Amino acid sequence: MFDMSLLGDALLGRLSFRPGAAPDKPALPAGRHHLGIAQERDAVLIVPENLPAGGPVPLLVMFHGAGGSADKVLPFVIEHARQRGFLLLLPQSQFPTWDLVIGGNGPDLERLEQALRELASRFFVDPAHLGFAGFSDGGSYALSAGVTNGDVASHVMVFSGGFMSVFQQNGSPRLFIAHGLEDEQLPIETSARPHVAKLKAAGYDVTAVEFKGPHHIAPPVVALAMDFFLPRVLT
């Protein structure tokens, strides 16, 4: 049997970043920021005004779909970040879609690592609420990276993802997998349902949501995912 460890952690999709370290730079003010890790398609960080004071901060990492960008998925999650008080990190693939979809872990994983480290240098990230989420190819990326790095991601939320590419399973993230019954691009029978079955058989805590609709992001389903990740505090 081939020893997968010979490939190296990065090729296997492993992040060396770990949350929980004390920041050593000033926190960024509320608003939209570029993290400065790339000249083009830089990672975007949304800092809401109502972050928890004096304690760890929840973080959601949202991956866009093929041919997309941070701005394509931002409208679906930004109000949840503001209402629930979590940091929102939106990486952007270097190519039209994520490296893992094209041919394997590479520059996008490296840029994700850099973005997480830069963010964590300014905010104390809550290890119990660090979520990976994504739509379509971004959902596949979130699921693959989240299961591979379940000792980093506490929650994984997949919206109409197509595949799961995992060479190593680490940790035990909670999983939310949503898919449309009329998905014309990534049929539920060959994507979400077999993924859910395999993950449940492997012992993961999986919440599966099947909704009436095509291949798209459904705001009511996103709301369910945000309740799964970080329930809103009623005042």
Image (cartoon, rainbow, N blue to C red):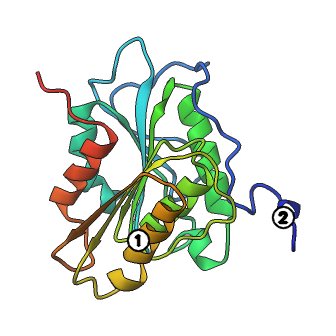
Three-letter residue code for mark 2: Leu
Q: Quadrant of residue 197?
A: bottom left
Checking the image for residue 116, the label placed there is none
Q: Which of 40 and 53 is in front in this view?
A: 53
Residue depicted at 21% across the width and 59% down the height? 221
| Residue that numbered label 2 is attached to | 7
Q: What element carries label 2?
A: helix
Q: Which residue is drawn at 60% across and 42% down?
A: 151
The answer to whether residue 182 is seen in the rendering is: yes
Which numbered dot is residue 161?
A: 1
Residue 200: horizontal and vertical position, in percent? Answer: 46, 61
Alpha carbon separation for disc pair 1 and 2: 26 Å
Along the line of sight, the residue nearer the viewer: 26 or 12: 12
Picture layout, residue 28 above or below residue 163? above
Q: In this view, does 83 lie to the left or right of 37?
A: left
Q: Where is residue 14 in the image (x, y as percent from the top left)?
A: 69, 53
**Res 3 → quadrant:** bottom right
- Amino acid type at circle 1 is Gly
